[in-house]
Amino acid sequence: MIGPSHLHNHSEAVVSTQSTGNFIKHTKVQVAKISPDLTESVAKEELQQSCDNFFRENIYLAGKSITEKAVERVVDGDTILIYKKSQLILHILLEAKARNKNFRVMVVDSRPDLSGVQSCERLTAAGIPCSYVYINSCTYVMKKVTKVMLAADALLANGYVLGPVGTALIGLISSTYNKPVIVCCETYKFSERVQTDSILYNELADPDSMLKTLNEEDTPVSNWRDCPNTRLVNLVYDTTPPALVSIVITEIAELPCTSAPVVLRRGAVKM
Amino acid sequence: QWYQRRVTGERRSYVSVVKTINVFRDLICTAEWVTGRELIKIVKCYCKYLPLSQSNETDVSNVVRRILKIIREESVGPEATNSADGISAFFKTDIKPCNLGRSDLQDNILNSIVELLAELDTSKSNIVNMALEHIHSNERILTYGHSNTIRDFLLYGRKARDFEVIVCESGPSLKGHKMAAELSEGGIKTTVIADSAAFAIIHAVNKVIIGTHTIMADGALRATNGVHQVAMAAKFFSVPVIVCAPLYKLSPTHLCSYDPDAFNKVIGPEKMLNFSNANLHSKVLISNPDFDYVPSDLIELFITNTGGHAPSYLYRIISELYHPEDYDLDNMCVEDVEDEMAT
């Protein structure tokens, strides 16, 4: 009979970001709750049902709720800055366009994955005027921006926002130029972990992807593995201090960053 | 014609400055003039032929200002320049006719120009030799993109100290990769990171050492695109930002407007979004600015060929290097305007 410990081995294999970590915790609890006299197929069905419920409540419906709240923040004449590609943020912008709001989007992208290009494609397909810059030019364009909307990969218990690397820089530049920073985050992404810097707990992506150039040229460090003195570090996440974020929009409320432990407490009581 | 050839490669800015000086040396020898004032007028008129209209080519215009200052000093003669801290010189915009004939004046000017060339020649080695005062063992230094001066500064420091360097790759040109390759060949442990990771790692860095394209009159920088946000992140974590640059990059101009044409230069976006995404090129406004404005309050120290200076001291250096009438090279002095109007 499958128990929670069996799941443990499989969950280690899954890339354990904080959000999937919460889902795995939820699933383990469900597995433990299943009564032993059910047959295997019925038990499997129940588990699948609970997984689907988790997805529906915490991801799909939460996304819709966040969209409702965030769309009200978009006003005519806005220039909204977004960073790379996020399903939730794109959904918000497309919904705002569907409600006939008149706004521009500034897409900020960064190497090595350059996922902002896909954001551009989806936004222009919907008819939203876009601009595109690399993160180095963020200070150059920040004057024309009215709002900044960022997505988070996790919200830590001390209010720090874990996001794709570069989010902290954008938060810093935006708050220096006094632009509101809106972070959209579902509650399943909230985490009990605390962190004050980005290095202690992070992930390293494939360093060779940093060598990829658009015209397939070699860069001077292409042979970095042969050079003992050269290292390429491709960080995946970084943490943004709560002072740089204006508001976090979740499906239950719009909160300041520092209210993260309140939401966690509420979630623990529910479970 | 020399000014039509682009100068590239090692010590690019120094080479273009030397070429400028040689052009003006020839001009001083061959043009028709009798007094210092006439020569200054000729030099200022000749400036129009140089690529100075692009406000970005400040090295060249700075060295022209130095030459003009030399001409002014030699025309006035040694007595006036030694008088009372030169304060009287500020109030006298006209140049007293000197007793020197053209050939003597020309010799004096050319000798001073030779001294100027010697000063420029040693400017880089003066900066590099200060490396040991600013780098200590087991430090982690962050640098941005590629700079010949910084590379030599760090390699000189490596001779006596053991330290690590983190290089931001400086997209989309990826000049940071070249810097990392050169540093690691010189025996320095180098790590290349993406520009977006600057905030993530900067708290673990001891200092930020960068080069610049131009130093503005108030101590601000016109530097490579992306330096401003690294400096902001450094300020957030109180990491000192040190700028190494020779004094011919110090320009008596201020930032008047954030307009791209006045300050910045936007280059082609093919390195950001290549033509396989051609359908996006027509629908999306892509910006690829070349420079970045870094305000002076983010900078801790300037290391120049005359030593280390705080940003607040640069105004004094400007008053020593350049004459106020030459700050705007298009400007003609009052007597010349009266002359023009009389004829």
Image (cartoon, grey):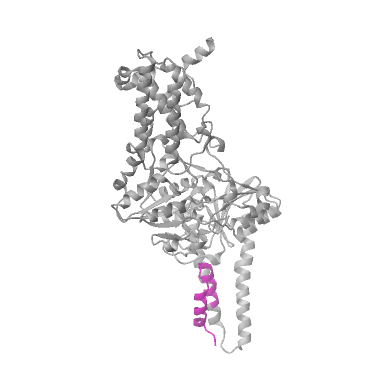
Residue B180 or residue B334, whichever sits in front? B180
| Front residue (pair B250, B128) | B128
Report the residue at 41% width, 41% height from top: B297
Indicate the position of residue A8 as horizontal and vertical percent values: 49, 79
| Front one among A45 and B152 | B152
In x, y percent, where is residue A93?
Answer: 65, 55
Nearer to us in this view, A66 or B128: B128
Quadrant where the C terminus of chain B sits is: top right
Most common SS among magenta residues: helix
Residue B201, image x, y percentages: 42, 56
From this view, report whether residue A109 is shown above or below residue B55. Answer: below
Magenta span includes A212:
no
Q: Where is residue B87 in the image (x, y as percent from the top left)?
A: 34, 21
Q: Is residue A144 above or below residue A270?
A: above
Tell how many labels.
Answer: 0
Q: Residue at x 54, y 85 (%)?
A: A2
Give the left or right position of residue B134, taking residue B339 as reference: left
- Residue pictured at 58% horizontal, 43% vertical: A144
Based on the displayed image, in which of its 4 quarters is residue B82 positioned? top left
B188 lies left or right of A144: left
Whether residue A250 is situated above or below residue B318 in the rendered picture: below
Q: Give the range drawn in magenta.
A: A1-27
Residue A163 visible (yes or no): no
A7 in magenta: yes
